[in-house]
Amino acid sequence: MARASDSQNLDPSRIMLGVLDAVEQDRVQSQRHLASELGIALGLANAYLKRCIGKGLVKVRQAPARRYAYYLTPQGFAEKSRLTVEYLSSSFGFFREAKVDCSDVLQAAKARGVGTVLLLGQSDLAEIAALCAIEQGVTIAGTVQPGAGGQQFVGRPVFDTCDAVTEPFDCVVVTDVGDARRICDEAVTRFGVERVLVPKLLRLRMRTPAEQAS
């Protein structure tokens, strides 16, 4: 998320988001690798990783071969979601990045036989996903947004829950940007990994129910 070739182009929030993203994606093989991943100095990467641990956002445990494994705490997931929303709302490239990601994920889904999808979350990202669905020839069954059932969004019905959806669908697309981690985990538990589509810009690693419980 926060990768860049020049660390001076990164503000503190972007660096923090980059660290949390790398931890969730299990890309922190070492602090040196993290620094290279984010395009920042080794000392800065070390300082931010320690800050995340000190704030209770990241936990560390010893792994074989004198290495360490890092993982996000519930507070870490919440902070990553908050920073992601902040990043997306301030990014001038949001529309372009979202359109490319949604087009890619829907095109790949259509190639394996997906014809109808359900959007999970009413947002700007959902609007872009709906636009891409039209371009890809994929039908939108509707959008799930608690508390908004009975309304219309992008010309399709809005439902309070997945149980209320009246039209059959092949897959769900995570389009909630404020609580994407929880929405994704619940969708995977209910529908299985193969039926959950996640645009890359949300930077979410699919977790099986067993991983979610650990």
Image: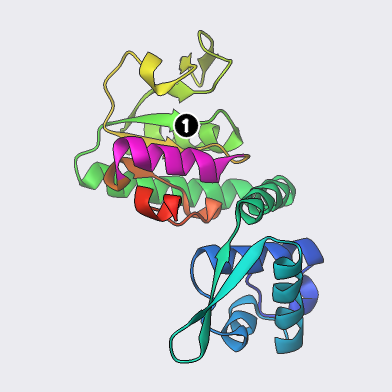
| Residue 7 location (% of width, % of height) | 75, 78
| Side (left or right) of 179 relative to 113 | right
Q: Quadrant of the C terminus?
A: bottom left
Label 1 element class = strand
Range of residues picked out in magenta: 179-192
What residue is rendered at 57% in x and 15% in y?
148
What residue is rendered at 71% in x and 82% in y?
46
Q: Nearer the viewer, residue 106 or 11?
A: 11
Seen in the picture, residue 183 relative to 167 is either above or below; the reply is below
Q: Nearer the viewer, residue 184 or 72?
A: 72
| Residue 150 location (% of width, % of height) | 50, 8
Tell me if I can see residue 119 in this picture: yes
Magenta segment's dominant SS is helix
| Side (left or right) of 107 relative to 85 | left
- Residue sitting farthest toward the top: 150
Q: How is the image coloured?
A: rainbow
